[in-house]
Image (spheres, rainbow, N blue to C red):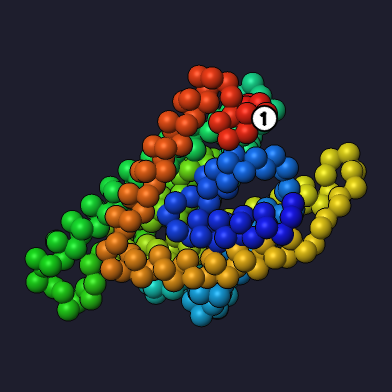
Amino acid sequence: MNVGEAIIQGIIQGLTEFLPVSSSGHLAIAQHIFGMTEDNLFFSVMLHIGTLAAVVGVYIKLIVGLLKEFGLMVKDIFTGKFRWSTMNTKRNMVMMLIIGLLPLFLLFLPIPGTDMNIKDLADMFAKSGFFIVVGLSLLVTCTLLFIGDRKNRKTVEAYDKSKSKKKNGTPGRKKYNVVDALVVGITQCVAAIFPGISRSGSTLAASEMRGINKQVALDYSFLLGTPAIVAAALLEGKDALFPEGGEKVTIDFLPVLIGMFVAAGVGFFAIKLFKWLLKTDRMYIFMIYTAAVGLIITVISIIELSTGVNIFHPEQALIF
């Protein structure tokens, strides 16, 4: 991988990891168009670390506050002072993040009749022969964003008609319950399997469908993704640095570092942009985009599957 490819993939990762358009889907598209057949697992790990730095940069105060609250909660649990019914907003967020992460363990369940786990489906669907999955998944993302946006508008309309505006402050619930957290957590698992289903977009939409305030929902979505990014980096990092068979790993650090810093910088501004677009009710931009790209990729995929030829690189066979 050269520096130019590293910059391209860093920009794609930084933008699409947080904007509701799917980072895995766009990386699959970029690799398909540019013929990037090299599977650089270590580079992928470093891009994830770059995007993790972006989340920490934006949410550093909230993350520190939640970590402090987690410590106090553990203390209360061991001293018998913990009460579920009296949890404050931060403690509720900590507990709901923990519950929302539990469904991730479903990804490690084995698929009967194969030597694969559920999470391995993501790697399979990212191959060129399954390019149509990317297109269809982007259309699913568009649909989820539309449904979530419509639900949020109804929540706002109900709030505008309410006589208790001063008491509530802003439309939508500010606290998650167990069902909310599990629904969003399961949605995150589904997004992890299908390249093209946006993790941030689908989890935001799931929260909006549950009646959560849209800004609280977005913060929860980003925070919920942080431990998932860390876990993915650790698991993939182990495989990248210590591959089976004891093969020697050769790493060109210059493009890796450049890609990581590009992903971090672009990701930071992508989060800020997403928060602003959500606040100003401009989510239709992402609906139009994912619908258009999804349709184009689906049509291209159908042509490729019917002809058995990679349109962009005819010399490359479709990989299944």
Q: Is residue 97 left or right of residue 214?
A: right
The picture quadrant where one finds residue 177 is bottom left
The residue that appears at 39% across and 68% down in the rendered structure is: 275
Task: Determine if residue 252 is in view.
Answer: yes
Q: Is residue 284 left or right of residue 19?
A: left
Task: Determine if residue 184 is in view.
Answer: no
Q: What's the amino acid at mark 1? A: Gln
The residue that appears at 43% across and 31% down in the rendered structure is: 299
- Between 283 and 161, which is closer to the camera in this rendering? 283
Residues packed near mark 1 inside 10 Å, few (<14), some (14 to 19) or many (20 plus): few
Q: Position of residue 259 (x, y in %)?
A: 67, 62
The residue that appears at 62% across and 33% down in the rendered structure is: 313
- Between 281 and 152, which is closer to the camera in this rendering? 281
- Between 7 and 167, which is closer to the camera in this rendering? 7
Q: Position of residue 178 (x, y in %)?
A: 40, 55
Q: Is residue 140 left or right of residue 246?
A: left
Please tell me whether residue 180 is drawn above or below residue 265 in the rendered image. above
The residue that appears at 38% across and 56% down in the rendered structure is: 204
Say what secondary structure mark 1 lies in: loop
Q: In the rendered image, which residue does mark 1 sit on?
A: 316
Q: Position of residue 298 (x, y in %)?
A: 44, 33
Q: Quadrant of the C terminus?
A: top right
Q: Position of residue 176 (x, y in %)?
A: 37, 61
Please tell me whether residue 128 is drawn above or below residue 153 in the rendered image. above
- Between 292 and 21, which is closer to the camera in this rendering? 292
Please tell me whether residue 205 is drawn above or below residue 217 in the rendered image. above
